[in-house]
Image (tube, rainbow, N blue to C red):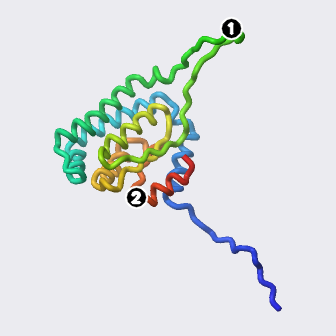
Amino acid sequence: MTTESVAPQAVETTPSPVAQTVAHLRQAFATGRTRDVQWRKQQLRQIEKMMAENESAIATALAEDLGRKPFEAWLADIATTAAEARYAAKKVRRWMRRQYRLLEVSQLPGLGWVEYEPYGTVLIIGAWNYPVYLTLAPAVGAIAAGNAVVLKPSEIAPASSHLMAELVPRYLDPDAIAVVEGDGAVSQELIAQGF
């Protein structure tokens, strides 16, 4: 008679690239760098610059993915994203301020205020029909709020997805903002990271 161990064998597993990316972004957020107003403004200005400097490449990608005309691409995706980034860069300091509130009589002479805090690392899953705007416009709000960001462009618009994966690390802080490309399985793996 032999004795065999019924305990499961320990299997060494290495984290997936998705898990590594998310862990890296969470570490960047933990350093506090995304909370700084200057960092937020710089990233928002860089989004505006990215849109302005790459109008033709973005329009070409949208034409390839969706058959969109250049003016429609400019109006629906490029100009609107740039305008949101410009507006957020202008207002972010104001949005970060404490907002004092009136208290109930029973709580006087106390002070009450609302102070907004970033969530941490956020996931933005883009849609296929407006792949640039519906991926980067939510990123504008997330960056203005001081979050680290994972962008997952739609796989149904591959040219736009590849272009964002190329441009975002070039213009934005790659330690705090990342693009993850892939299909629905990648989206599920991202969601499983606990956003």
- Position in image of residue 72 (x %, y %): 19, 40
Question: Of the residues shown, which amino acid type is indicated by label 1?
Answer: Val
Tell me which residue sits at (46%, 20%) in the image. Answer: 94
How much space separates mark 1 and mark 2, taking CA atoms? 55 Å
Question: Of the residues shown, which amino acid type is indicated by label 2?
Answer: Gly
Residue pointed to by mark 1: 105
The front one of 168 and 110 is 110
Mark 1 or 2 closer to N-term? 1
- Position in image of residue 104 (x %, y %): 66, 11
Q: The N terminus lies in which quarter of the figure?
A: bottom right
Residue pointed to by mark 2: 182
Tell me which residue sits at (43%, 48%) in the image. Answer: 178
Question: For the image shown, how many numbered marks are present on the structure?
Answer: 2
Left or right of 30? Residue 64 is left
- Position in image of residue 146 (x %, y %): 49, 34
Q: Quadrant of residue 48?
A: top left
Q: Quadrant of residue 13?
A: bottom right
Left or right of 122? Residue 129 is left
Above/below status of 133 relative to 65 = above
Left or right of 63? Residue 35 is right
Tell me which residue sits at (55%, 27%) in the image. Answer: 116
Mark 1 is surrounded, within 10 Å at the Cα level, by few (under 14), some (14 to 19) or many (20 or more) other residues, namely few
The front one of 182 and 103 is 103
Residue furthest to the bottom: 1
